[in-house]
Amino acid sequence: MSAAWLLERMREFEDRAAVVWRDRTVTYRDLTRLVDTCDQELAAAGVGSGDVATLEGDYSPASCALFLALARRRAILVPLTPSVAAHREEFLDIAEVQVTTTIDDADRRQITRRRTAPTNPLMRQLIERGEPGLVLFSSGSTGASKAALHDLTRLLDKFQVRRQQKCTLTFLLLDHIGGINTLLYTFANGGTVVTVAGRDADSVCRAIAQHHVQILPTSPTFLNLLLMSGAHRRYDASSLELVTYGTEPMPASTLARVHEAWPHVKLQQTYGLSELGILRSKSRSSDSLWVKVGGEGYETKVVDGTLWVRARSAMLGYLNAPSPFDADGWMNTEDQVEVDGEWMRILGRRSELINVGGQKVYPAEVESVLLQIDGVEDATVHGAPNPITGQIVVARLTLAKPEDLSGLKRRVRAFCATRLAPFKVPIGIEIATHDQHTARFKRVRA
Amino acid sequence: MRIILPMTQPQPPDREVVAALVMAATTDVMLQRGHADANVAPDTRLVGASAVLDSLGLVTLVVDLEQRVQDELGYGLTLANERAMSRTNSPFLSVGTLTDYIHGLIVETITRA
């Protein structure tokens, strides 16, 4: 059945706005026509079923149309964005890409054939079944990126259920599971995708005001930067109904401040992984970090404080790593959680846990306190080895203006001492000289 | 014309300079950790039953001292390592022994250079 149903569905929406790009509106009629044009271009270049093809660019009418045309032609899509430019060649090799499709700033398309034919057994299986695929590279903060291969038909399946028609800003990038989820959800329901040229606070807030955006899917780090910039005070955000945040644990202090800045907006945590897709989620309330995740097609369980998920739409496997699934199809997410009945709270990755003399410290909790200190614009926390306590908590702070380190230490430790258990108070304190986040607005811990 | 300067061996700081640094850092950490006042003397104990700091306080002091020795005296030292931990007479016993230890490490660094 592939992706055909989605295009048929999209044709129903006719004159509704599908994509806003550079403040220009493209209707569903325009977009589905553009899909047909792209389809012809791909056919002319001999791109068809089972071809592994990149889709390189940011959200635009052409990139959306190419995505849909490639899916319809049952190709294996490999979305790449400039944020992974340094790894492009490596990624092309891992995915054994045969065709590159790029979209330039003027939304022109270029289709280029490469030689390699896929040899990866997992990829071969999918190609032999004649289904379209999707390759997503995990943005693993440590270690090499893993390439998750999805059966795109299966991933699309859950969008057949009709849901709300919304105007959504595409903040998360096109090569991110969250970005793809937003795009497919929006198109399957006749909503509007509002694209932004820059992902800075002002561009985002301006687009929200100008195009009456209802949903902003983003990350805790970006929300923190937005509050710091004060952009929320400069632009009207009355259209905004829902801000979703995921990709990393939310500092409680940032959540409280977003709630204060936009009291009319519902704040909802999302949970998803490149390997599993995005789970449906419900936050207990807008100022709560307790969340219920799952929804149809997903099962969850907590084993020794770690979250395991089994998903119908899970990837087939990695192209370059052993399968992370156990015999029954469960995947260990490595996310440590606290459980209260049907609610859970995500504490952080097991690998980021700091062990101070046998006591556990989650970076997110300490960062949340550090972010409340005057003059601290951003904060990351990591562990450093220490022969006395095994590890110590080290904080790296981005300051609003230069400050003497000894004075800063005194101030930071005094602030933390009244809000954190003694072993969680940062012992090492450093002043950051660079931005402490990735192009995807996710914290980079040393 | 070239002026040839005689090669000079860098001189280690006086022990008194190191002592003042250790006392100041200890005072700082004690105050940060809730002591109302801090009367620090060379025989102030840092480890053991009469210690003025708990283990986290000691770790904090050591990390702060590494940073201050670097910033104020220009020597990059690692104070807490397996070698220091395995000594029969712990260098972290008191303010005095810690001063001797740091001063000794600086002298060692200069001689090795």
Image (spheres, helix red, strand yellow):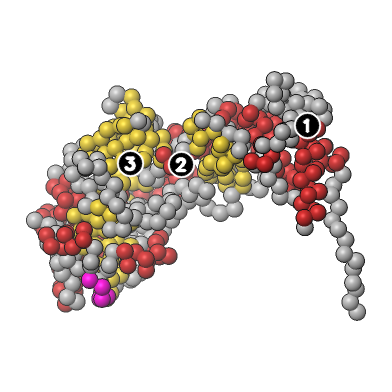
Towards the viewer: A401 or A322: A322
Residue A180's place in the image compared with B83, above or below, is below
| Mark 2: secondary structure | helix
Disc 3, SS: strand
Q: CA distance from mark 2 to mark 1?
A: 35 Å
- Dot 3 alpha-carbon crowd within 10 angstroms: few under 14, some 14 to 19, many 20 or more: some
Q: Are marks 2 and 3 on the same chain?
A: yes
Q: Quick check: A306 above or below A402? A: above
Of tags 2 and 1, the one toward the viewer is 1
Q: Is residue B93 left or right of residue A367?
A: right
Q: Check the image and name the residue furthest to the front.
A: B88
Q: Secondary structure at mark 1?
A: helix
- Circle 1 packing at 10 Å, graded few (<14), some (14-19), many (20+), is many
Chain where mark 1 sits: B
On screen, residue B47 above or below A57: above
**Viewer-nearest residue: A437 or A445:** A445
Task: Report the span colored magenta.
Answer: A113-117
Spatial CA span between label 2 and label 3: 13 Å
The disc labelled 2 sits on which kind of residue?
Glu
Residue type at tag 3: Thr
Considering the image in quadrants, where does the N terminus of chain A appear?
bottom left
Give percent across and percent down for residue B45: 75, 26
Q: Which residue is mark 1?
A: B95
Pointer 2 indicates a residue of which chain? A
The disc placed on residue A22 is: none
Reading the image, the residue beneath label 2 is A352
User: x, y (%) of residue A94?
Assistant: 31, 64
Instruction: Tell if the residue under mark 2 belongs to the same chain as the one under mark 1.
Output: no
